[in-house]
């Protein structure tokens, strides 16, 4: 069983030069603006309010860094969770959006510390074109030492038949609910395995 010993906010960055030093294994959370990134980070770390969620989709324009200390079998592990700006919703000026997307793309492609991309998908809309495009993009840029995990959020809003459709189309899909905490432990274990599986 994996336990979260500590979780804290490190800093926000608007461009690459402001990001934290490379080194610690990073998990980058990517997803549409209203997919519930902050809620999932709070649920995974079991710390309410660690990641601030905005009532206005697309408001998070910064890359936010959180350090997490995990314990398993009396061993301690350190990782960094990175909350990336959401895509698809932002009501910002064209030039700002371009600058923001450029910084985001630079971070995703050039950041050596990223070991896992967690692509969050709203389980109520599992087949959106934008999510398919993001997944294809991640597959194109992913390095040999990186992983992509698809996690479907808002599981509590689904009927059993809708869950079956997701499982049929995405074998091995991870489905979670940040409000009921269903699937959260499984998701944390999957993330842990991508980072530290070979160190156990």
Image (spheres, rainbow, N blue to C red):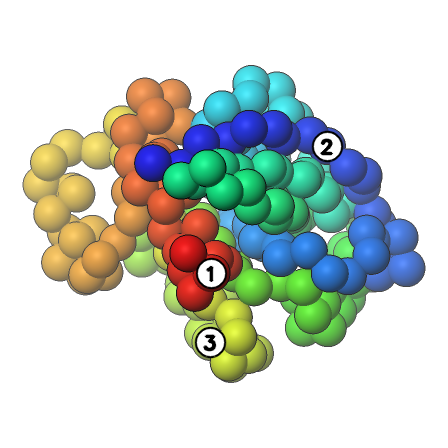
Where is mark 1, residue-wise? 199
Task: Point out the frontmost of discs 3 and 2.
Answer: 2
Across and down, in percent, residue 119 comes to 46, 55
Mark 1 / mark 3, whichever is N-terminal: 3
Which element type, helix, strand or loop, lies under badge 1?
Answer: loop
Residue at image position (73%, 73%) is 110
Across and down, in percent, residue 168 comes to 13, 58
For disc 2, the neighbor class at 10 Å (few under 14, some 14 to 19, many from 20) is: some
Where is mark 2, residue-wise? 9
Nearer the observer, 122 or 115? 115
Q: Is residue 167 left or right of residue 8?
A: left
Where is mark 3, residue-wise? 139
Nearer the observer, 113 or 163? 113
For disc 3, the neighbor class at 10 Å (few under 14, some 14 to 19, many from 20) is: few
Q: Which quadrant of the structure image shows residue 109?
A: bottom right
Residue at image position (90%, 59%) is 17
Across and down, in percent, residue 138 comes to 51, 71
Mark 3 / mark 2, whichever is N-terminal: 2
Image quarter (top left, top right, bottom left or bottom right) of the C terminus: bottom left
Badge 3 vs badge 2, beta-carbon distance below 8 Å: no
Q: Residue furthest top?
A: 48
């Amino acid at each position: 069983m994996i336990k979260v010993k500590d979780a804290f906010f490190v800093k926000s960055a608007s461009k690459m030069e402001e990001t934290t030093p490379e080194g610690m294994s990073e998990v980058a959370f990517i997803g549409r603006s209203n997919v519930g990134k902050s809620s999932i980070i709070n649920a995974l770390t079991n710390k309410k309010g660690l990641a601030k969620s905005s009532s206005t989709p697309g408001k998070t324009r910064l890359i936010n860094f959180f350090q997490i200390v995990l314990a398993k079998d009396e061993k301690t592990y350190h990782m960094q969770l990175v909350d990336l700006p959401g895509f698809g919703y932002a009501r910002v000026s064209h030039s700002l959006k371009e600058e923001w997307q450029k910084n985001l793309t630079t971070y995703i492609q050039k950041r050596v510390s990223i070991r896992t991309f967690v692509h969050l998908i709203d389980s109520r809309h599992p087949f959106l074109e934008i999510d398919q495009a993001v997944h294809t993009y991640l597959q194109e840029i992913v390095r040999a030492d990186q992983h992509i995990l698809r996690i479907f959020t808002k599981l509590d809003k689904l009927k059993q038949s809708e869950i079956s459709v997701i499982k049929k189309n995405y074998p091995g899909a991870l489905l979670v609910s940040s409000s009921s905490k269903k699937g959260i432990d499984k998701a944390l274990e999957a993330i842990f395995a991508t980072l530290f599986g070979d160190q156990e």
